[in-house]
Amino acid sequence: MSLFIVHHQHSPDSCPARDPVKGALLLNHLSRPNAARHGVVIRAEAVARGSHSLFFIAEAADEVVLQAFLAPFREVGEVEVTAATTCAAIVSSGGCDADIVEGSAALVDPADACQDAIEAGLLIHRVNPLNGETSVPDLAGGAVMPNGRFYLRNHFDIPNLNDDGYRLSIGGLVERPLSLSMTELHNLHAESLVVTLECAGNGRSLFEPAVPGEAWGLGAVSTAEWTGVPLMEVLERAGLLPGAKEVTFRGADSGIVDEHGALVRFERGLSIEQIRETDALLAYEMNGEPLPLPHGYPLRLIVPGWYAVASVKWLTEINVTDQPCAAHYQMEKYWYHWVREGHDEYAPVKLMNVRALISSPDQGENLPRGETAIRGVAWSGAESISKVDVSLNDGPWREARLIGERRRSAWQWWELITRLERPGPLTVRARATDMAGRSQPKRAEWNRQGYGNNSIHSVTVQVI
Ligand SMILES: Nc1nc2c(c(=O)[nH]1)N[C@H]1C(S)=C(S)[C@@H](COP(=O)(O)O)O[C@H]1N2
Ligand SMILES: [Mo]
């Protein structure tokens, strides 16, 4: 479908809208169902007051289809059709005067994916590759995040994999290399897990001094129910050979990475031991629907408890080896790099740090005096949450009520009902502690790539 702007102009003496019968005919012609019968989708229309000028935005397969639909308007005046595009397409192709790049069938059109994300309310950081986060107040809501509002983190173009031709290959140190179709995967024993995914860079923009990388606020985190086949069962079906210790996961996406100047595939690794410990899943459903294209359709890895970089999307190959994965996103990215007393120290990014976020009230909100609810979510990659404490204006920590089931790998809702007596500025802080006794620092330790920022969240509001 192509987008068009239509401008219709008639003279004041022949204004069809003045005649009730002609006016009604035009309204019926413009109705959404009638337009659809002509192969036209009307996005919006408006008449400029007092100027006998109608504008509308429409989609059609091409201009010929649209022009045929516009015949009744040509009978009563002029019609001008302008080829148009979306703001998302303009930004993704580099500005108003750039040529619109036609996508290839093997990739999802970045402008379309971006348009969907904008309509679902994501805050867009980058159109191409598409990166967007959930707004912090939106983190509150149902037990899981609706798919459209789940944050998106992509390093490259989004592959458009076709279900029919799709195969997951499992090779390397296995007795029986496998090549599984989606039908075969659907026929295997399935499990559902509610798992929180958080980008390791979530909260990066709050590090001082500033660090390079996608400048995430606090909304690069969400929770969904993932359904699929336990990874270990598929590996056992293939049969691990002696010496099989490590597994590499390859996504279908690739692109040029500055440091290499060459094509890099998105690949990550886990040891067999880590796979056993985490209950990793080969997921084909997200909240009961097939995985959406930007979230890894038709199959992705879900590694409960780990920062989401481990959860490889558009998974096509699994390779069992005796060597740890040495891929770019394993060895060159996703390492904490601390500078401690002049020394460089490194550690790989693995489990999510313990963290609470306040979803309500929102930063800068006006709160009426009296009873108010402070709410949010809290999670930890290592353990379930044991408590969340809330402090008002640096006062004593008060324990919030945990709501819902306690799950190891999914966030926990919490709430504190309190009374606000005095008008004026109020700072609310929330601090989570997990079952292993880990808690949050006032300020998380700065590291060069800005990973794992779990500083205590605070919001400031006005009590009125
Ligand atoms: N194939 C592939 N898998 C990927 C990525 C990617 O760019 N390509 N990004 C990773 C990172 S860094 C994150 S935070 C999560 C984001 O998952 P989501 O977009 O479904 O929220 O996917 C991970 N898996
Ligand atoms: Mo990420």
Image (cartoon, rainbow, N blue to C red):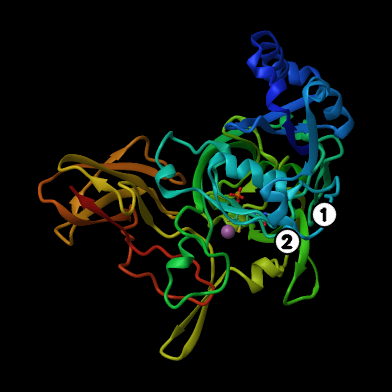
* Picture coordinates of residue 27, whole percent (x, y): 67, 16
Amino acid tagged 2: Gly
When the figure is inspected, residue 137 is found, relative to residue 259, above or below; the finding is: above
- Horizontal and vertical percent for residue 219? 47, 52
Determine whether 191 is above or below 198 in the image: above
Mark 1 → mark 2, Cα distance in angstroms: 9 Å
- Quick check: which quadrant has ligand 1? bottom right
* Residue extending furthest toward the right: 64
The amino acid type found where label 1 is placed reads Val
Do the residues bearing badges 1 and 2 touch, measured as CB atoms within 8 Å? no
The residue drawn where x is 20% and y is 48% is 399
Q: Which residue is mark 1?
A: 101
- Report if the beta carbon of the residue with label 2 is closer than 8 angstroms to ligand 1: no
Quarter of the picture holding the N terminus: top right
Q: Which image quadrant for residue 188?
A: top right
Residue furthest to the left in view is 421
Q: Position of residue 461 (x, y in %)?
A: 26, 53
Q: Is residue 374 above or below residue 442?
A: above
Using the image, tell me which numbered label, if any, was put on residue 190: none
Residue position for label 2: 94
Quadrant of residue 226 within the rendered picture: top right
The foreground one among 213 and 462 is: 462
Left or right: 215 with respect to 206? Answer: right
Q: Is residue 393 left or right of residue 104?
A: left
Question: Mark 2 or mark 1, which is nearer the start of the sequence?
Answer: 2
Q: Residue at x 64, y 16 (%)?
A: 18
